[in-house]
């Protein structure tokens, strides 16, 4: 019986693997065309200061409008872009696009408007002078470093032998802030917080989803917030979908919130409209 079951699983498993390998191959070929074909665009999700309910930050999130498959989630194509190395040219495009938008919004929305940009660990490792390229792009736009936050993930800080620390330092020297994304889900080691200068911790949405008084998630959020504050780090909670989650996090002293309760990631024009309509 075990054998038969094993064979059934085998038959079921192999086609799926092939199918997904084929899909990935096709997607990686399509990705090569996507930049030139202008199939990418950025969405912007507001980051709300909880105590005042005001917004002068947003996170840039990439979208891929595939010519035949429709909208593809970054969760599905960023890993392929990373495997193929295409993430470097895509990352540079994202930075340029987000920086240009930030220039305009510093004039129209808020003079201190600040953009958070995700930078892949693969670009940190494979393109070790990309930080210089990014700083040059800022200079060409006369945009100050204070207008940019770079979001990194915990895994990047594991990489002791790379030039990551240097790259992060030169960002910080230019006034760019650093945010630790998805905090608590990676290879969390508190020693990173001692070794690297971090400005923001982003509590991962998995801790926020089931937040309730007396829950383990509540205890974790409270502890993260207290620890961060004692280290001079501000806290951003991700994935806030309900007013109850917002209220619990605000009461716990969380500095900023991001999530569907406030707004979904929006194309630039719709993001501007939010401000024009004073809905935030
Ligand atoms: P992330 O950087 O942690 O981004 C937050 C994700 O949470 C976004 O998914 C956002 O749309 C989603 N989100 C925001 N609020 C809520 C909420 O209230 N509920 C729920 N369920 N989700 C919420 P998205 O845009 O699909 O991006 C997924 C991931 O893909 C990002 O996670 C990031 O790791 C990566 N990614 C997205 N854009 C970029 C980019 O421009 N560059 C790089 N390197 N990675 C990116
Ligand atoms: Mg992020
Ligand atoms: Mg995150
Ligand atoms: Mg995430």
Image (cartoon, rainbow, N blue to C red):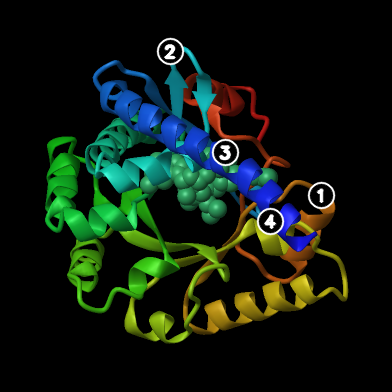
Tell me the SS state at disc 1.
helix
Q: Quadrant of the C terminus?
A: top right
Say which label, 2 or 4, has the lower sequence index. 4
What residue is rendered at 57% in x and 21% in y? 273
Residue 34, horizontal then vertical, whole percent: 32, 23
Tag 1 or tag 4, which sits nearer the N-term? 4
Q: Which residue is mark 1?
A: 243
Q: Is residue 40 left or right of residue 130?
A: right
Q: Earlier in the sequence, mark 3 or mark 4?
A: 4
* In the image, the residue with mark 3 has its CB under 8 Å from the nearest atom of ligand 1: no
The residue singled out by tag 3 in the image is 16
Using a 10 Å C-alpha cutoff, classify the residue at mark 1 as few (fewer than 14 neighbours), some (14 to 19) or many (20 or more): few
Q: Which badge, 2 or 3, comes first in the chain's sequence? A: 3
Which label's residue is closer to the chain start, 3 or 1? 3
- Dot 3 lies on which element? helix
Q: Which residue is mark 4?
A: 6
Residue 95: image quadrant is: top left
Q: Nearer the viewer, mark 2 or mark 4?
A: 4
Q: CA distance from mark 2 to mark 3?
A: 24 Å
Q: Nearer the viewer, mark 3 or mark 1?
A: 3
Of residues 212 and 39, the one drawn nearer to the viewer in this rendering: 39
């Amino acid at each position: 019986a075990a054998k038969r079951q094993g064979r059934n699983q085998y038959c079921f498993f192999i086609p799926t693997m092939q199918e997904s390998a084929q899909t990935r191959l096709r997607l990686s070929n399509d990705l090569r065309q996507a930049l030139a074909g202008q199939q990418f665009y950025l969405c912007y999700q507001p980051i709300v200061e909880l105590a005042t309910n005001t917004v002068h930050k947003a996170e840039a999130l990439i979208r891929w409008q595939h010519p035949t498959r429709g909208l593809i989630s970054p969760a599905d194509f960023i890993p392929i872009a990373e495997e193929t190395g295409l993430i470097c040219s895509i990352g540079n495009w994202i930075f340029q696009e987000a920086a240009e938008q930030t220039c305009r919004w510093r004039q129209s929305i808020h003079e201190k408007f600040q953009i958070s940009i995700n930078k892949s660990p693969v670009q940190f490792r494979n393109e070790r002078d990309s930080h210089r390229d990014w700083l040059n792009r800022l200079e060409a736009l006369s945009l100050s470093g204070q207008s940019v936050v770079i979001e990194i993930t915990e895994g990047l800080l594991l990489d002791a032998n790379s030039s990551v620390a240097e790259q992060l330092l030169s960002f910080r020297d230019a006034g760019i802030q650093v945010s630790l994304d998805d905090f608590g889900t990676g290879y969390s080691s508190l020693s990173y917080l001692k070794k690297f200068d971090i400005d923001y911790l982003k509590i991962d949405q998995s801790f926020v989803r089931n937040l309730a008084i007396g829950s383990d998630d509540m205890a974790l959020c409270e502890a993260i917030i207290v620890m961060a504050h004692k280290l001079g780090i501000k806290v951003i909670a991700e994935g806030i979908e309900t007013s109850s989650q917002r209220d619990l996090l605000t009461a716990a002293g969380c500095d900023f919130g991001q999530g569907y309760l406030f707004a979904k990631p929006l194309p630039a024009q719709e993001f501007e409209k939010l401000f024009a309509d004073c809905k935030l």
